[in-house]
């Protein structure tokens, strides 16, 4: 019995080697996501589509269809990843992401942009839950994984910041910005090929954990429903405002298109604050911090709805990006801390289904409202944010 116990004890050098390999995995994952964050067309993403004849409502309908596809693929992807390991599905998904950017680069009609989004949905459904479970397995304890999730968010924003700063150097060439994005996504795929499966106690525990039935996973997500819905209401609002409405808001305030790259870089730079999100956590836990961030997000949306001052919009959109970047890693940490043992990727995918269901309903409504009257889109976003804050308050009281 004693001999068996001794055999299970790892030599210090072996333990150090495991830590180094997991640290290397985290570094490679961060690099891959930094490259994936380098979307060079980001400063003119809405204008790019408008130039091709795609309306704002069509953009948000495509967004809703995209989320609907993800909804159907989440659990199958999660179960497959839990069964074969997380590395191979991630490599496959990064390959599909690179292909989606090739389609975007060549798209000239609404159907081309829909095809790009469908490929993107396939890949994002595969990564949802899988990448977070992979990163979680590469960490030793809650404090380390909270820091890792915050840094993960930060490197994606850093990539977006660098790409946005490059826009003024592209001479207003929309197609070139899309082609450069193909390059960055292809490099990200190359980096994922260097990843290895995580090692250590957490990875071993995940491998031994039983695979839960779908009903059990759905019941667990239902217990978190108020929290998930609250986060989804804010995230979808911030996504629409920062990604789709921002360029129209700048135009409404009289800001020249030449300044859009700098403003996009400012939004991306503000998003780097997500890397420090774990430091905001106090006695109330990350849930309370999320609630406060979402409440402020509603106030920012209201301000954007009533202003035509260039300076206010130039600061308001980046502030909304910063709030979203801080809330995202905290929400991921909450989900990973609350999830039950067994089938982590599949359980997280069930949570993602709730987020996507909400997005399917909200995206077209936000898009149509903003197309009719842009301030109305921001006003509706403020209502969604404050409804989300109320849901998080209810979740906090229930706990």
Image (cartoon, grey):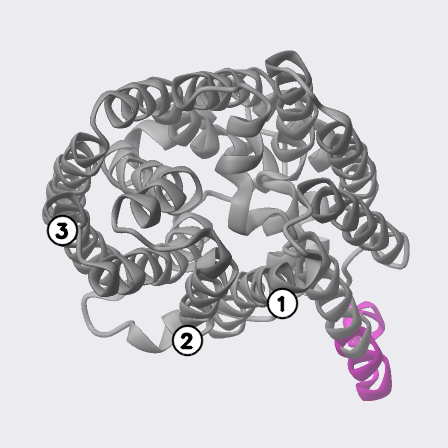
Q: Foreground: 351 or 277?
A: 277
Q: Quadrant of residue 106?
A: top right
Classify residue 242 as left or right of residue 181.
Answer: left
Report the magenta residues as a range: 1-19
> Real-space Cα distance between discs 1 and 3?
29 Å
Percent position of residue 240, x then y: 37, 37
Q: Residue at (83%, 53%) from the top-left corner?
A: 192
> What mark, if any, has residue 307 been given in the picture?
3
Q: Residue at (58%, 25%) from the top-left corner?
A: 74
Question: Badges 2 and 1: C-beta atoms under 8 Å apart?
Answer: no
- The residue labelled by disc 2 is 276
> Is residue 113 at all visible to an observer of this figure?
yes
Q: Residues within 10 Å of mark 2 (few under 14, many from 20)?
A: some
Q: Nearer the viewer, mark 2 or mark 3?
A: 3
Which comes sooner in the sequence, label 2 or label 3? 2
> Is residue 348 at all visible to an observer of this figure?
no
Q: Foreground: 238 or 177?
A: 177
Percent position of residue 261, x then y: 52, 59
Instruction: Report the residue that reaches farthest toward the top.
Output: 111
Magenta: predominant secondary structure element? helix
- The residue labelled by disc 1 is 162
Q: Residue at (40%, 68%) from the top-left corner?
A: 270
Which comes sooner in the sequence, label 2 or label 1? 1
Classify residue 157 as left or right of residue 108.
Answer: left
Q: Quadrant of residue 384?
A: top left
Percent position of residue 132, x then y: 59, 50
């Amino acid at each position: 019995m004693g001999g068996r116990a001794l055999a299970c004890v790892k030599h210090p050098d072996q333990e150090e080697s495991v830590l180094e390999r997991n640290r290397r995995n985290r570094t490679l994952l961060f690099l891959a996501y930094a490259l994936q964050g380098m979307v060079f067309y980001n400063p003119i993403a809405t204008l790019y589509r408008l130039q091709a004849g795609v309306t704002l409502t069509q953009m948000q309908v495509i967004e809703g269809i995209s989320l609907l596809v993800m909804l159907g693929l989440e659990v199958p992807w999660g179960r497959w990843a839990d069964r074969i390991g997380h590395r191979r599905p991630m490599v496959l998904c990064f390959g599909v992401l690179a292909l989606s950017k090739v389609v975007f680069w060549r798209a000239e009609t609404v159907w081309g942009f829909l095809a790009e989004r469908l490929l993107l949905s396939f890949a994002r459904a595969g990564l949802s839950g899988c990448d977070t479970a992979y990163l979680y397995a590469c960490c030793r304890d809650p404090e380390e994984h909270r820091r890792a999730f915050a840094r993960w968010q930060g490197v994606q924003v850093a990539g977006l910041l660098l790409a946005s700063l490059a826009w003024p150097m592209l001479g207003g060439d929309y197609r070139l910005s899309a082609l450069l994005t193909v390059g960055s996504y292809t490099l990200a795929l190359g980096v994922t090929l260097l990843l290895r499966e995580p090692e250590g106690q957490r990875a071993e525990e995940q491998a031994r954990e039983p695979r839960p039935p779908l009903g059990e996973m759905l019941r667990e997500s239902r217990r978190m429903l108020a929290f998930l819905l609250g986060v989804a209401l804010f995230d979808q609002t911030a996504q629409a405002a920062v990604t789709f409405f921002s360029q129209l808001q700048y135009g409404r305030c009289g800001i020249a298109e030449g300044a859009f790259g700098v403003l996009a870089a400012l939004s991306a730079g503000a998003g780097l604050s997500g890397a420090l999100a774990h430091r905001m956590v106090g006695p109330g836990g990350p849930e309370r911090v999320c609630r406060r961030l979402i409440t402020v997000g509603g106030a920012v949306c209201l301000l954007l709805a009533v202003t035509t001052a260039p300076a206010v919009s130039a600061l308001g959109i980046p502030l909304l990006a910063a709030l979203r970047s801080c809330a995202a890693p905290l929400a991921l940490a909450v989900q990973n801390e609350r999830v039950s043992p067994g089938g982590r990727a599949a359980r997280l995918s069930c949570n993602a289904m709730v987020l996507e269901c909400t997005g399917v309903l909200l995206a077209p409504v936000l898009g149509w409202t903003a197309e009719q009257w842009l301030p109305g889109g921001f006003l509706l976003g403020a209502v969604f944010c404050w409804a989300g804050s109320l849901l998080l308050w209810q979740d906090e009281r229930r706990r």
